[in-house]
Image (tube, rainbow, N blue to C red):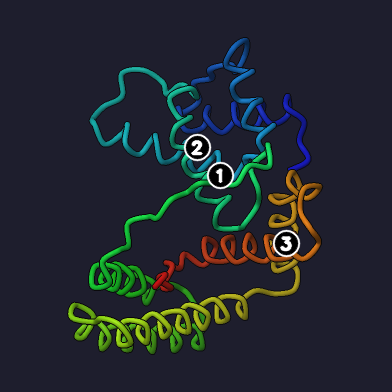
Amino acid sequence: MTEDAAEYCRQIETYLCKKNEGHLIRIVGPVFEQVSGWAAQGVPLAVAFKGIDQYCERYYAKGPRRRPVRIEFCEADILDLFDSWRRAVGVPSVDGAEDPGGPSKRDSLPAHLDHVIGRLTALRGSDRSAQFRETLDAAVRELDSLRASAKQARGDVRTAIVARLAALDAALLDAARAEMDDRQRAELRAKAEAEIEPFAARMAADARAAAVDAAFTRLLRESARLPAVVLAP
């Protein structure tokens, strides 16, 4: 992300204007300082936009809107998503402190499989190559067979299922990558590098390369609309 604070705020302002159906709310004064703080922390614009989307989806679900959404209301969603993004790609916080994180609640394996199968099944009718659809169909069939034993899976059995999920996840991402041409892959790589750039000075070369790879994978997954099949043991 190379935008300075003013440009960052302008892009946030423009995006929020679109979400508000053309109603422009200027980002000035204390709100400018608030949004500039996101830029200083290294919050990628794509993450900020997703946070705005997330807040607006909840807002719209409550019924007809009475007033335009203000950017201040979106901050909690944006910062929560930024924390998740930062942990996923492995970049440090701005002050260099370790992320305490804490153990997250482990997802129910059967529920996770149900969610993934539903997402992948919805992609079957999409306009994809025959090779991608074959990979998709094979993944859905295997996930459906794994679901039968997932509820009672413990110990080595659960570990084996998790390992298969990781392999299926990698296969789907490889299939999605294969559908892209060199220009599309280069553009996605450039976006990934731009996301990591604010943190680059604080990272060793190998850590930075790993973070860029993780950001690329996240962007590839979003572009292909693939769910995360992999599940931490």
Residue 45 falls left or right of residue 157? right
User: Label 1 vs label 3: CA separation?
Assistant: 21 Å
Which residue does the image show at 69% across and 50% down from the upper left?
A: 195
Give amino acid for label 2.
Ile
Q: How many other residues sit within 10 Å of disc 1, few (<14), some (14-19) or many (≥20)? A: some
- Residue 77, compared with residue 226, is above or below; it is above
Which one is closest to the eye, mark 1 or mark 3?
Answer: 3
In this rendered view, identify the residue nearer to me: 202 or 217.
202
Ranked by sequence position, the earlier of labels 3 and 2 is: 2
Q: Which residue is mark 2?
A: 78
- Residue 106, compared with residue 3, is above or below; it is below
Residue 148 in the image, given as x and y percentages of width and height: 19, 85
Q: Which residue is mark 3?
A: 207
Report the disc number at residue 183.
Answer: none
In this rendered view, identify the residue nearer to me: 58 or 101.
101
In this rendered view, identify the residue nearer to me: 223 or 139.
139
User: Label 1 vs label 2: CA separation?
Assistant: 7 Å
Q: Which residue is mark 1?
A: 47
Ranked by sequence position, the earlier of labels 1 and 3 is: 1
Looking at the image, do the residues carrying marks 1 and 2 touch, with CB atoms under 8 Å apart? yes
User: Label 3 vs label 2: CA separation?
Assistant: 24 Å
Which residue does the image show at 42% across and 67% down from the upper left?
A: 227
Give amino acid for label 3.
Ala
